[in-house]
Image: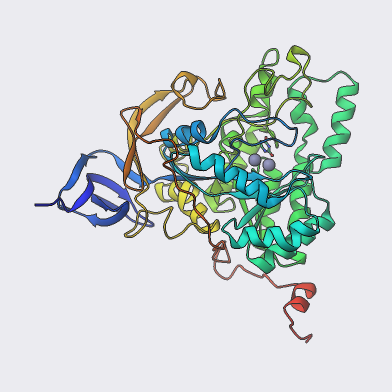
Amino acid sequence: MEPHFDLTIRHARIVTDDTIVEGDVGIRGGRIAAIGPDLPPGARDIDAAGRWVLPGGIDSHCHVEQLSGMGVMGADDFYSATVSAAFGGTTTIIPFAAQHRGTAVPDIVRDYAERARAKAVIDYGFHLILANPDDRTMTRDLPEAIRGGISSLKVYMTYDSMRLDDYQLLDVLDLAREHGALVMVHAENNDIIKWLAKRLIERGHTAPKFHAVAHDPLAEAEATNRAITLSRLVDTPILIVHVAGGSTVEVIRSAQNLGARVLAESCPQYLFLTAEDLDRAGLEGAKYCCSPPPRDAGSQDAVWQGFMDGTLMTYSSDHAPYRFDETGKLPKGDQTTFKEMANGVPGLELRMPLLFSEGVLKGRIDIHQFVKLTASNHADLYGLAPGKGRISIGADADLAIWNPDRETRITYENLHDQVGYTPYEGRVIKGWPEIVVSRGRVIVEDGQLHAARGSGQYLPRQAPRFAWPLRRPGDSRHQAGPFAKALAGAKDD
Ligand code: DUC
Ligand code: ZN
Ligand code: ZN
């Protein structure tokens, strides 16, 4: 008799949207076909007794094979990045197709698509980084990219080579509302950072730890508040990426409580690192330099709290892979100042294991919150649902079988990226995704990869879906302002 399924995973603890099912998952044609007890056999059966079956992670913020604002190419290409993600339980990534000044969106999108197509081993979509909002981009190329499935874009309020001013941000928000795209904002006050950095360097304060001094938490909180203000003015939702500071979490929570349509993300580096890591011996602190920088224990607590109470809805890696040598962190060798170091830390592979260990197993978040923060909220906010992000009938069979008891001492030797170090070296964590399945294919098992280069698929994305209000029912006092009402053609009362 023909087997009923291509793959049956048996005796597992399966985490669906809001329930836990003890039983089996049947997979056919790359999709989840059945969930329940005692399913018929598959062509292959995996006994997952004592293990958890969770949705494959979605990492909606990572930089892959991308030139940074400073013109530095990251160390990972679409092969090494997706292999690394897969070993950490992630089955979908949304990196960036990055526009720089003087480049055209269609060329950029084509270029990234070609490189990813040949190399990715898991599925992927793209956001656009928008650095050149000229007439052609705004009237033709951007709307076309959004219609073509790139339904989110990132804008920078800092970095001289990338930043948009408030006038340009308003234009972008206006366009995003009209075309149904989500705007992700890197919110830091450019002038504050430049002003502080200049004075620090003039006084000889060039060591990595001064990166965290120049990127003061006030610069983050101010820009976040400004971005929210602009988004309210034109009634367009925004998503603040990589929230680091406790004061920024507060700004976002207060705005959400007033009904502002603001979403927010944070990352492992803001839960597990602090500014003290930038103060390691010699230039070692450069390994921990990212923007915004890790802050203090109070901010770590605030970010945890933000994840626990829903202020922060997505947990992403912001994987920005730069080697600890002249190609990345140290372009001028031991003479490199904090202004010259490439900004970014690796995190694709350890993002989920770190949160599983320190969040779920230490009781800070429950397993359903874990699934939302690592997968299903990303699918909803970035237009990948219902195919991705959940263990449900008909969805793509993207999942990971986690052993909650396995202890791992983190060491770079066991990771799969090309960065050469991990900021989490030596930590001991519990829980690991031992088997990873992408569209029904077992792609990681027994520490081995079983996926061919280029076997990942491109995912054109729908318009983002979010259910407002995000906080408690009855909490939403969101009112469109006069400008938004006028645009919508509403009559004055
Ligand atoms: N900051 C960014 O804005 N992007 C990549 C990494 C970083 O540190
Ligand atoms: Zn950023
Ligand atoms: Zn980033």
- In the image, 55 versus 247, the foreground residue is 55
Ligand 3 located in image quadrant = top right
In-image side of 154 versus 407 (left or right): right
- In the image, 271 versus 69, the foreground residue is 69
Give percent across and percent down for residue 455. 41, 41
Q: How many marks?
A: 0
Q: Is residue 45 above or below residue 26?
A: above
Q: Residue furthest left?
A: 1
Q: Is residue 186 above or below residue 207?
A: below
> What residue do we see at 70% from left, 20% from top?
279
- In the image, 318 versus 294, the foreground residue is 318
Q: Quadrant of the C terminus?
A: bottom right
Q: Is residue 435 above or below residue 151?
A: above
In-image side of 416 versus 131 (left or right): left
In-image side of 52 versus 297 (left or right): left
Give percent across and percent down for residue 472. 55, 64
Q: Is residue 231 visible?
A: no
Give percent across and percent down for residue 247. 71, 45
Q: Is residue 130 above or below residue 230?
A: above
Q: Quadrant of residue 56?
A: top left
